[in-house]
Amino acid sequence: MRWTYKPAPNPETTAALAESLQIDPLIAGLLVQRGIEDYEQARLFFRPELEHLHDPFLMRDMDQATTRIERAIRDGERILVYGDYDVDGTTAVSLLVAYLESEYPNVASYIPDRYREGYGISFQGIDFAEDNEFQLIIALDCGIKAVEQVTYAQAKGIDFIICDHHRPGATLPPAVAVLDPKREDCSYPYTELCGCGVGFKLIQALQLRKGLPVESLRPYLDLVAVAIAADIVPITGENRVLTYYGLQVINEDPRPGLRALMQGIQRTHYQVSDLVFQLAPRLNAAGRLKHGDQAVQLLTERDWEQARRYALEIDALNEERKGLDQQMTEEALSIIREKGEESNMTTVVYRDTWHKGVIGIVASRLMETYYRPTLVFTRSGEKLAASARSVRGFDVYEALEACADTIEQFGGHTYAAGLTLEEGKYEEFKSRFEAVVGETLLPEHRLPQIQIDMPIHLEDITPKLWRILKEFAPFGPGNSSPVFASGPLRDTGYARTVGGNGAHLKVSVTQQGTAPFAGIGFGLGTQRERVENGAPFWAAYSLDENTWQGKTRLQLKIRDIKSESP
């Protein structure tokens, strides 16, 4: 892996912060690296407050959105809450439905079918709204580019409110309100909200209009935290506050649907990583293999026994998804090898029988193998559909824009996107995408990167340091668990491999005579020879706790090893 170091914190700022907070300069340096330079900023970082969330009416069109919803409720109109089929979309729909239904009965939800309707607002969904006499559609986590669809609804007398967080196109849809912090004409102070986060700002605004504080919305934050984690948005600013309190709700009193889903997961305390790798895949399985409606049913269900039944159904779908994931990944790797494309700048593979709901996961698996921009295609009706994933530092959305004349439609983010195209355009697109990436992908993008906060000595690691580092949570993009580098280290003769086929490496290390410190490197079993027989090495690692036979000890969670000083 390529080791890169964060810029060293300003020594004067670090010293002043250490003095102000009466903390170790090491901790002060980590805070300064995160943009925390004075006592007040540190107080808000360690003790986030819901009351410090931004005024939702700073978001463009929020006034129009709340006024239209209040009118719909006053006039007894039917409201349809429409959302994408992934976790961000289904949690957002569940959030708004649960909030509105708490005082108004004429509310229903609509999740488009991934296979018959595809991503975003569909004409079929609008026809459903017309047939069932809905006068207002609130779209969440989609709609920012749905100009034709919203125009179509407008002609039928149906109003739209759009709550999205994706990049807008050149023209905004003619909706009553378009809530999107990424609008160029929107001056909202925080632009990294997920779709469910934008939905939360909407209900916060509705509460403010009633004179109620944001604290009254605390029970809804379990949904927001799951969405933030699943959508891999930065856990900074408002997202950090929402996740901080959302995790409290998840760990103390989650809604019945989440609690039922959590029964199949052995955790005593949930962190962001558990939401990403345990809860989110289960919720996603509904939309991937069957229908996103199942996730909404689960998340809005109030009866415990019914929630348990829904959770068992979704768990079964997730197990089926795992099997498909493994099979499709093996087939894709075989195609790449057969075509001799291991050395390409990109990975672009296609098989018409692949399950559309799993291609995004397979794209992530392939990227882990070859570490380059990746697209996995399958057939979707008369078109081909793909999921794209990218490496750190490379904007796959911009690369797709450069190939726009070969694509029918696309959307997404810097590191993940989706697209459709005509089958006859596949080879042209594949060639163009390879050329575009070849011209813009830098050599440093070709190696997985580990970013290190700072080098430290093993003697710096104390129980007090660990207690304070845990207060840096919740961890995630933009606020990762601190990564340190130390060396030269020497193993005390304990080095051994563990796990299936010796996949993992366990060590006990010292640095210049320090007491031995346990460490484990998941997936680093092949590095054993580098650390045996007292050979010096350098390690990049984070700190972790290991509980064994009732005893909890600190250990190094080793990310990478180098034989020479990096």
Image: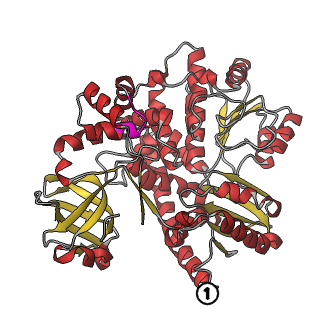
Determine the image quadrant of residue 59.
top right
Determine the image quadrant of residue 407.
bottom right
The residue beneath circle 1 is 338
Image position, residue 92 (x, y; %): 58, 39
For residue 486, side relative to residue 260 (left or right):
left
Which region of the structure is painted magenta?
Answer: 31-37
Image position, residue 277 (x, y; %): 43, 55
For residue 422, side relative to residue 50 (left or right):
right
Q: Residue at x 79, y 42 (%)?
A: 126
Disc 1: CA contacts within 10 A as few (<14), some (14-19) or many (>=20): few
Q: Tell me, what colour scheme is on the image?
A: secondary structure
Q: Which of 56/306 is in front?
A: 56
- Residue type beneath disc 1: Glu
Is residue 536 at all visible to an observer of this figure? yes
Q: Residue furthest toward the top?
A: 211
Q: Residue furthest toward the front?
A: 12
Image position, residue 160 (x, y; %): 76, 33
Split into 4 quadrants, where in the image is the C terminus? bottom left
Is residue 34 magenta-colored? yes
Split into 4 quadrants, where in the image is the N terminus? bottom left
Image position, residue 374 (x, y; %): 61, 67
